C-alpha cells in the first residue's frame, strides 16, 4: 500500500478496513471480539477499541501467519470448542457468509473460506 499506516487502518467507504471487518463479525453477535495486532499494534488497538470498547486486544509479537494469529487469540475465546471464528483483513465478507460458515461449523470440525479473484493479474502488479 506504499504507506507507513498499517493496512487495516486504510479507509474504504469512510471507515478503516478494520472497522468493516469488526462490523461483519459483530453481526453474528459473538461472545467475544478479539483483535490480534502486530505491525502498528498500538494504532490498530486504539482504532479497534474506538469502534468497540469491549474488543479484546492480543499482541502477536512475531507475525508468523494467519494460523499463528488465530492461535494467539484462542485463549481469549470464552468457549474454544464452540466454533469460534477468526476474521482478518477481509472487510467486505458479508454477515450472511459468516453465518453460513458458522452453520457449517455445527456439522464439521473445520470450515475454510476461499475465493478466486476476478482479475488475478491485476493484483500481482
Image (cartoon, grey):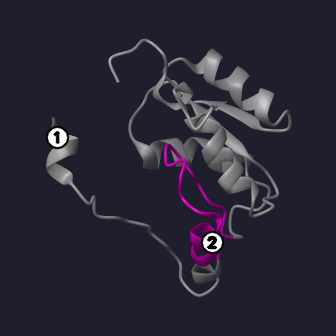
Residue 99 placement: quadrant: bottom right
Q: Camera-side residue: 6 or 65?
A: 6
Q: Name the residue under label 2.
A: 96
Residue 84 belongs to magenta span: yes
Residue 90 belongs to magenta span: yes
Callout 2: SS: helix
Residue at 57% across / 82% down in the picture?
104
Real-space Cα separation, disc 1 to disc 2, in angstroms: 29 Å
Tell which residue pokes out farthest to the front in this image: 13
12 versus 28 height, above or below: above
Residue at 54% across / 83% down in the picture?
108
Residue at 51% across / 24% down in the picture?
61
Residue at 59% across / 88% down in the picture?
107
Residue 26 image label: none
Q: Which of marks 1 and 2 is nearer the N terminus?
A: 2
The picture places residue 44, in percent across and down from the top left corner, at 62, 24
Callout 1: SS: helix
Q: Mark 1 points at which residue?
A: 124
The picture places residue 101, in percent across and down from the top left corner, at 57, 74
Magenta: main secondary structure: loop
In the image: residue 53, left or right of residue 101: right
Image quadrant holding the N terminus, namely top left
Amino acid at each position: 500500500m506504499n504507506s507507513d499506516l498499517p493496512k487495516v487502518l486504510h479507509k474504504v467507504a469512510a471507515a478503516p478496513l478494520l472497522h468493516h471487518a469488526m462490523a461483519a463479525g459483530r453481526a453474528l453477535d459473538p461472545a467475544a471480539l478479539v483483535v490480534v495486532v502486530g505491525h502498528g499494534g498500538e494504532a490498530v488497538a486504539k482504532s479497534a477499541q474506538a469502534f468497540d470498547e469491549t474488543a479484546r486486544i492480543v499482541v502477536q509479537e512475531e507475525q508468523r501467519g494467519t494460523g499463528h494469529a488465530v492461535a494467539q487469540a484462542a485463549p481469549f475465546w470464552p468457549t474454544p470448542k464452540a466454533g469460534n471464528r477468526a476474521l482478518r483483513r477481509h472487510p467486505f465478507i458479508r454477515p450472511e457468509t459468516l453465518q453460513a460458515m458458522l452453520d457449517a461449523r455445527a456439522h464439521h470440525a473445520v470450515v475454510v473460506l476461499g475465493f478466486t479473484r476476478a482479475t488475478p493479474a491485476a493484483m500481482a502488479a
